Image (cartoon, grey):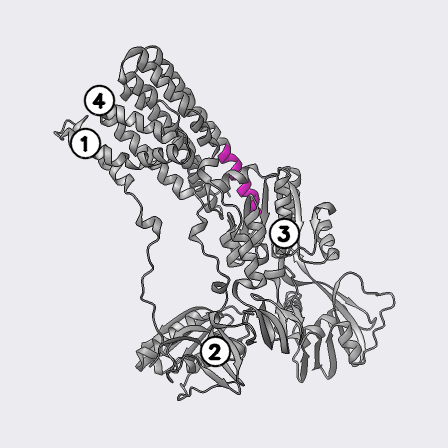
């Protein structure tokens, strides 16, 4: 039996991906006349209980067939419509939860019935191959552990008085110093300059040679703490591989020699005829050969409304098929598609170096050579290596190494508790400096979904309530976003959805239905005209609005206005950014100029800062141009089409429910999907910057004072280490204030 990865054939427009082995031993499933050739006995099942979003069924086979139960479990867990699965074999019970706003009870029942049957036709394969360790993990040096051992031995052999061979202590210090030596050598050989690590190495070497083991051991421990914390805050783009093919389905239906064959997406060739069913993503760029479909292109183009595509029109990879079925001639595949080029553009964006761009570390770096020269001068004047070592020990580097990343990590932790994920210290630093914010419109400033904004009667004898009542009855159980919005709005208005008898839905036009003995038409102006409805709009001329018309028995009754409405917090957030934060706000959108200008006017965004009909490359260009003007730019977006602009911004912001690519590209992710999180992120970043500057002062003042004493009068290296480490501890605790503040807020009792 040949083991292959395939997809269960589409059932009523829904698909489930899973690894299986075909029973016929072939490398793909073959479908003729819309039906798989694999046949099996029917698996009996019955509905026990159902509520919106939850369904419980009885499947007797679960009680006696453990393999079948496992296959069904994997099939259901892999299904995009199912949110959770619970199987109780002893009770032959299957409980499934799903999203009722995405699929009706009838459709999910039919879909589950199909999967229950399909589980008897496949054999699930489990992936057991372990993931290879990354190069960084393989090459990691246990510096933290070695420095801890060196410190423990120094304490035992020093203050505690245990008999520890000096060679053992010195050897542990030497091993723990190797990472410092490596970084110092790289600074000299690669960067052609002396760095902080060279200064640390000199102080460690002198005090170790003198037998003062506690001083270098404590220094090493603090250095490693700082390095480890900093590494956690650094952004590593190499850890995220953004491949377009991984964001699409793993298998594609193609037509070859008159047969529908399912193949891995990597095997699709230019010129193949690709078939796309409802609920699937289009896997290629190409031209429709036959069929028509309603496509959701929001994640790619930013357009909030689904688009009707017919024979001869172009479709793009990563767009979602809502309704219909199309046969596409594949013209561009994989990373050559429009979405793939967006990802390529994003991957070519400049990579920032967190460590070297840090404000406080730059100060410490500039102090290296003067400190080294001063230590050399003290040794030349006194011939006392201990006094020279004291000078080298009293550098600002050790304290800043610890206090800066501690402050950064505390700020990142505090932000995470507030529902804002900031990925790196560099992102935090840049966020504090932001003076320009560019917003994508659709799904960022707006909700990214259709809502009814008004109902108008065009017949004096018909009330607005009746207009809405007829429209909701005609549109019920249709999956078009406007239809769903009308039904949802009617329910919020307390209107009962009337029963619908005979009905006929025409894709992209409208629906004709029999309701209360009346023939009702709901759809576009063009649809109603073709159905013979007299569109008398005198005094009600069509303005710059999105409208659906309602007619009954050949007479126009009214119309419903709908739009992609603003997020409830958008106006408040934009106003706060413009007035309180003093930030320049821009808006980018793939929508037309009319729509873009209307939204910008509502938000108070200046017309010159509104950029309409912007595709991915143009969005990235706008961000680059603002950056070249000397501005520190933040970009806020949530779609694939936003990923290039996100990558080219100084700091990029996305939502937790945005596209995977936008989410992984972003420096800041708003986990609560609320723009108020952006205001909080900016406030946290600016307070962290203040703390870093404050901590720099806390470290500089005592170290400068001790340095003067060491130069003029002499200071024991251990005392110098205590001063240096003491200021480090104070600055480190001060840097933890965001975490301590958040914990205090959580424990405060509520006042009622």
Q: Residues within 10 Å of mark 4 (few under 14, many from 20)?
A: few
The residue stretch that appears in magenta: 675-689
Q: Give the farthest residue toward the left.
A: 163
Residue found at x 55% / y 43%: 650
Image-based side of 174 in relation to 97, left or right: left
Residue, disc 1: 169
Q: Is residue 344 above or below residue 578?
A: below
Left or right: 543 in relation to 173: right
The CA distance from mark 3 to mark 1 is: 59 Å
Element type at mark 1: helix
Q: Is residue 562 magenta?
A: no
Give the distance between the C-alpha atoms of the residues marked 4 and 3, in whole angstroms. 61 Å
User: Within 10 angstroms of label 3, few (less than 14), some, or many (20 or more) residues?
Assistant: many
Quick check: marks 2 and 3 in contact, CB under 8 Å? no
Looking at the image, tell me whether mark 1 or mark 2 is earlier in sequence order.
1
Q: Can you say which quadrant of the picture contains the N terminus?
A: bottom left
Front-lying residue, 585 or 456: 585
Cβ–Cβ under 8 Å for marks 3 and 1: no
Q: Which is more toward the observer, 2 or 539? A: 2
Instruction: Mark 1: give few (<14), some (14-19) or many (20+) Cα within 10 Å.
Output: many
Q: Are the residues tagged 4 and 2 within 8 Å (C-beta)?
A: no
Earlier in the chain: of badge 3 and badge 1, it is: 1
Q: Residue 683's spot in the image, x, y percent?
A: 54, 39
Asked whether the residues under the numbered discs 4 and 3 touch, taking CB atoms below 8 Å apart as contact, a structural biologist would say no
Disc on res. 262: 2
Helix, strand or loop under label 4: loop
**Distance from the alpha carbon under mark 1 to that under mark 4:** 13 Å
Q: Quadrant of residue 529?
A: bottom right
- Residue 176, image x, y percentages: 26, 36
Residue placed under numbered mark 3 in the picture: 619
């Amino acid at each position: 039996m040949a083991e292959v990865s395939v997809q269960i054939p589409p059932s009523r427009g829904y698909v489930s991906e899973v690894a299986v082995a075909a029973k016929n031993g072939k490398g793909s499933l073959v479908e003729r006349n819309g039906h798989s050739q694999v046949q099996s006995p029917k698996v009996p099942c019955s509905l026990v209980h159902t509520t919106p979003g939850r369904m419980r069924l009885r499947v007797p086979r679960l009680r006696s067939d453990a393999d079948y139960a496992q296959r069904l479990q994997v099939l259901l867990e892999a299904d995009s419509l199912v949110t959770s699965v619970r199987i109780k074999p002893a009770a032959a019970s299957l409980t499934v939860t799903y999203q009722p706003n995405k699929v009706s009870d009838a459709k999910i029942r039919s879909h589950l019935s199909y999967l229950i049957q399909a589980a008897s036709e496949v054999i699930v394969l489990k992936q057991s191959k372990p993931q290879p360790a990354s190069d960084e993990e393989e090459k990691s040096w246990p510096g933290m552990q070695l420095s801890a051992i060196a410190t423990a031995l120094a304490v035992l052999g020093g203050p505690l008085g245990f008999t520890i061979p000096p060679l053992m202590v010195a050897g542990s210090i030497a091993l723990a110093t190797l990472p410092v030596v490596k970084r110092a050598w790289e600074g000299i050989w690669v960067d052609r300059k002396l760095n902080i690590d060279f200064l640390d190495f000199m102080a460690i070497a002198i005090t170790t040679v003198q037998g003062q083991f506690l001083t270098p051991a404590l220094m090493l421990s603090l250095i490693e703490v700082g390095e480890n914390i900093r590494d956690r805050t650094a952004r590593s783009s190499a850890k995220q591989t953004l491949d377009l093919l991984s964001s699409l389905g793993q298998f594609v239906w193609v037509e070859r020699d008159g047969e529908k064959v399912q193949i891995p997406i990597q095997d699709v060739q230019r010129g193949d005829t690709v078939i796309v069913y409802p609920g699937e993503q289009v896997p290629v760029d190409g031209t429709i050969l036959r069929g028509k479909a309603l496509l959701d292109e929001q994640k790619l183009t930013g357009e909030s409304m689904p688009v009707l595509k017919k024979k001869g029109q172009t479709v793009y990879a990563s767009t979602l098929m809502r309704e219909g079925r199309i046969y596409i001639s594949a013209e561009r595949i994989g990373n050559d598609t429009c979405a793939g080029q967006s990802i390529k553009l994003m991957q070519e964006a400049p990579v920032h170096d967190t460590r070297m761009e840090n404000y406080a570390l730059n100060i410490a770096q500039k102090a290296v050579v003067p400190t080294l020269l001063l230590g050399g001068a003290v040794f030349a004047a006194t011939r006392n290596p201990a006094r020279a070592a004291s000078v080298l020990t009293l550098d600002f580097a050790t304290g800043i190494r610890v206090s800066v990343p501690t402050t950064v990590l505390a700020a990142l932790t505090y932000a995470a508790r507030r529902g804002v994920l900031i990925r790196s210290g560099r992102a935090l630093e840049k966020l504090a400096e932001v003076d320009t914010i560019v917003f994508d419109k659709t799904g960022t400033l707006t909700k990214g979904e259709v809502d009814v904004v008004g109902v108008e009667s065009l017949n004096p004898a018909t009330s607005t309530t009746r207009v809405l009542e007829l429209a909701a009855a005609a549109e019920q159980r249709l999956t078009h976003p406007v239809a769903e919005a009308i039904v949802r709005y009617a329910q919020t208005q307390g209107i009962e959805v009337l029963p619908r008898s005979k009905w006929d839905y025409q894709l992209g036009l409208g629906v004709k239905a029999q309701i209360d003995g009346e023939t009702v038409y709901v759809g576009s102006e063009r649809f109603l005209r073709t159905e013979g409805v007299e569109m008398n709009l005198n005094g009600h001329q069509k303005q710059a609005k999105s409208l659906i018309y309602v007619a009954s028995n050949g007479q126009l009754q009214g119309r419903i206005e709908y739009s992609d409405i603003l997020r409830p917090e958008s106006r408040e957030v934009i106003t706060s950014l413009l007035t309180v934060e003093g930030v320049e706000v821009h808006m980018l959108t793939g929508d037309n100029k009319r729509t873009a200008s209307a939204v910008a006017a509502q938000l108070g965004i200046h017309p010159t800062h509104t950029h309409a009909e912007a595709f991915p490359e143009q969005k990235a260009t706008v961000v680059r141009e603002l950056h070249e003007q000397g501005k520190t730019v933040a970009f806020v977006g949530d779609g694939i089409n936003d990923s290039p602009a996100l990558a080219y911004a100084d700091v990029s912001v996305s939502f937790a429910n945005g596209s995977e690519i936008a989410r992984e590209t972003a420096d800041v992710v708003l986990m609560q999907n609320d723009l108020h999180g952006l205001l909080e992120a900016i406030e946290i970043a600016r307070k962290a910057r203040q703390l870093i500057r404050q901590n720099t002062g806390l470290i500089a003042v005592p170290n400068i004072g001790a340095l003067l004493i060491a130069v003029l009068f002499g200071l024991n290296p251990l005392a110098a280490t205590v001063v240096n480490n003491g200021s480090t501890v104070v600055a480190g605790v001060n840097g933890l204030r965001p975490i301590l503040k958040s914990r205090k807020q959580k424990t405060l009792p509520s006042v009622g």
